[in-house]
Every structure is written in C-alpha cells, then in structure tokens.
Amino acid sequence: MTKAALKTLADIQVGYQAKARIKERAGGTHRLIQSKNFDSFHRLRSENLTVFFPERKPEIYSVRKGDILFQARGVVHFAYCIEDDLKDTLAAGSFYILRTKNENLLPQYLAWWLNQSKAQAYFQSQARGAGMSFISKSTLSRLQVQIPPLSVQKKVVKIVTLAKHEQFLLDRLSSLRSRLVKAVCIKAIQEQER
C-alpha cells in the first residue's frame, strides 16, 4: 500500500463562482449542483438542480462522470463521486471538483477515503471559521491518501455501493411503511364516522 498527497493524485478545481446570487431561469443552458441538492446521506438528488445561464465560461466548472465533488464550505465536508453523465452541469463554488490523474486510483475509492474518519479528523483540525467552516485548497491538497492495490480498491467500492443500495432500500421501505400506517389509521377513522 502506498501513501501520497492528494495534489499528486488529483487535479483540484474550485467550483463555479457567481458574481451575484444565481437565479433559476426557464430555458437556461446549464444546471448547477449546490449543497441543497444532497440528502442527509450525501446522495445527489439531480432532479432538482437549478437551471440557469452562466456568466462565465462554463467548461471550466463542468462536471463529468468520475469527478469528485468535495464540500469545502459548510458544516460537513463530504465527498461525492459523480456516477452519471450529467450534461451541461456545473458544481457551485462551495465545492472543489477533483479529477484523478492516475489510472491506479479509482475515483469512487478516493471519494470514500475523503469521507473516512482519518480524513475527516484532518479536515476538522484544519478548518477555518466557526459553524460554516471552510477547507482551503492547499489544506485539501496536502491530505495524505492511502492507496491500496486496485483489486482492493474495487472491493471497497463494491462493498460501499452495496451498502448505499441497502440504505436506499431501507429508506424506501420506511417511507412505504409510514404511508401504509397513515392510510390504515385514516381508514379506521373514516369507518368510525359512518
């Protein structure tokens, strides 16, 4: 297993910086990923992205499959690997866009590593500001990443993917159960009114 600074493993790009507050525009040319588009499990909800017209060159801030978004500004500093092809989609300025440089490093593994307690403890110790803290690009670039062989990375990614799918199914089951309980209770009340 090797260890290396993140700056040697990935290019780090700051997300889209708008001059003014971004407003939703019907017929906009691009979509914007913002912190609010992630659920409590840090899963991207791409169906509600803001549609807008970028003020500056969008190509620099465009995300593609395999890119990692790192939440640099906020209460929680999490990483998310883009799993789908998101056409004409940019990442907001609260994110860094990471693009791996090395074929021997899976982006999904790197995103997982950034979310682990060792990396998170490093971010907590280096964060600036209270409440809504900030991780600088230089702080992120200095993070030491453990890189196991590709075969181990693939196993980690597979296990993590299965765990995420299980969580999705559990959430869905919980939601359906709540709806069922509500429907049964309402039906019982309605039957009493007859």
Image (spheres, rainbow, N blue to C red):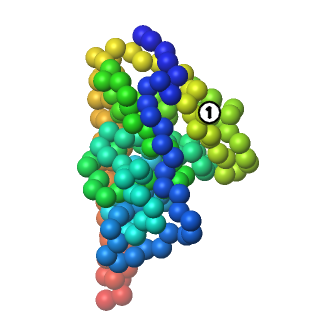
Q: Quadrant of residue 164?
A: top left
Q: Is residue 130 left or right of residue 139?
A: right
The image position of residue 11, as x and y in percent, is 44, 34
The foreground one among 177 and 155 is: 155
Residue at 49%, 15% in the rendered image: 3
Identify which amino acid the numbered label 1 is placed on. Thr
Residue 142, above or below 3: below
Q: Quadrant of the C terminus?
A: bottom left
Q: Quadrant of residue 90?
A: bottom left
- Give the residue at the far right of this rendering: 130
The image position of residue 179, as x and y in percent, is 34, 66
The foreground one among 5 and 157 is: 5
Q: Is residue 105 left or right of residue 139?
A: left
Q: Is residue 87 visible?
A: yes
As helix, strand or loop, the secondary structure at mark 1 comes to helix
Residue at 41%, 50% in the rendered image: 60
Residue 38, above or below 27: above
Q: Judge the density around disc 1: few (<14), some (14-19), many (≥20) Cα neighbours within 10 Å.
A: some
Residue at 42%, 51% in the rendered image: 61
- Give the residue at the far top of this rendering: 1
The foreground one among 154 and 179 is: 154
- Give the residue at the far bottom of this rendering: 194
Q: Quadrant of the N terminus?
A: top left
The residue indicated by pointer 1 is 139
The foreground one among 147 and 174 is: 147
Residue 76, above or below 47: above
